[in-house]
Amino acid sequence: MTTTTSTSASEVVGDLAVASLVTAFATDPVIRWVYPDPGAYVASFPGVVEVFGGDAFAAGTAAVADGHTGAALWLAPDAPVDADRLVAHLERTVDPRRIDAVLDLLGQMDEHHPADAVWYLPFIGVDPAHQGRGLGSQLLAAGLTRADRDGLPAYLEASSPRNRALYERHGFTVVGELRAGDSPPLWPMLREAKP
């Protein structure tokens, strides 16, 4: 397990980590609701990852599994998220018939995000060819250790029942359910810091 640093080597690691997230999210219910067309998904989802979670690479808070088989993009409490850039990317890449519901869901995510300082995990995933080996738990633990050391909660949104169960095993609790239009459910989850 590696944590990236802001060097040119980390740019390569970042590109490979984004590629692993693209394979990991290929069947994710919420992401594929946003991009149901395979071509649009492959062309557009990497941009979502880079805008929404890319600061984790520059800040050195991304955890990347050996062989770039998975990644967790942890964002520190003060990490910037360029909401305008994300919305612009979505408006360019999401089917116009679906964009209002997608932006509604994004707005709900923003409303449910804790006002207090938290470590936020916008993306975690393992290449399907490497799932079932504990890599997801290792990637999750890397960020939870940091959050506990800082005495801060961790926050994420679960996009499938399987992922929700994984997060619950690691101490997360569901704090809501988000839906927009005909979207699948998205569950905001919070884990208090452990002493």
Image: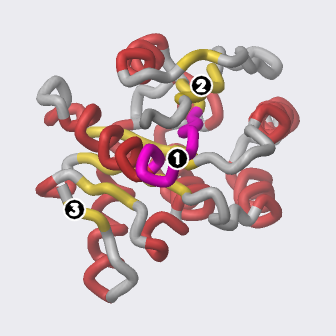
Q: Observer-nearest residue: 50 or 189?
A: 189
The residue positioned 61% from the left and 16% from the top of the image is 174
Rendered location of residue 161, percent (x, y):
47, 11
Tell me, for residue 2, which label it has, or none: 3
Amino acid at the residue labelled 1: Gly
Q: Is residue 53 above or below residue 167?
A: below
Q: Is residue 36 visible?
A: no
For marks 1 and 2, the one nearer the N-term is: 1
Q: Which residue is mark 2?
A: 189
Amino acid at the residue labelled 3: Thr
The residue positioned 43% from the left and 69% from the top of the image is 57
For marks 1 and 3, the one nearer the N-term is: 3
| Residue 152 falls inside the magenta stretch | yes
Q: Secondary structure at mark 3?
A: strand
Residue sitting farthest toward the front: 195
Q: Secondary structure at mark 1?
A: loop
Residue 140, by quadrant, is: top left
Rendered location of residue 53, percent (x, y):
54, 57
Q: Residues within 10 Å of mark 3 (few under 14, many from 20)?
A: some
Q: Is residue 143 left or right of residue 136?
A: right
Tell me, for residue 104, which label it has, or none: none
Q: Which region is colored magenta?
A: 147-156
Do the residues under discs 2 and 3 have CB atoms within 8 angstroms? no
Q: Estimate the spatial distance between the alpha carbons at disc 2 and disc 3, rounded to whole Å.
A: 25 Å
Rendered location of residue 128, percent (x, y):
23, 32
Q: Which residue is mark 1?
A: 151
Residue 181, by quadrant, is: top right
Q: Observer-nearest residue: 140 or 10?
A: 140
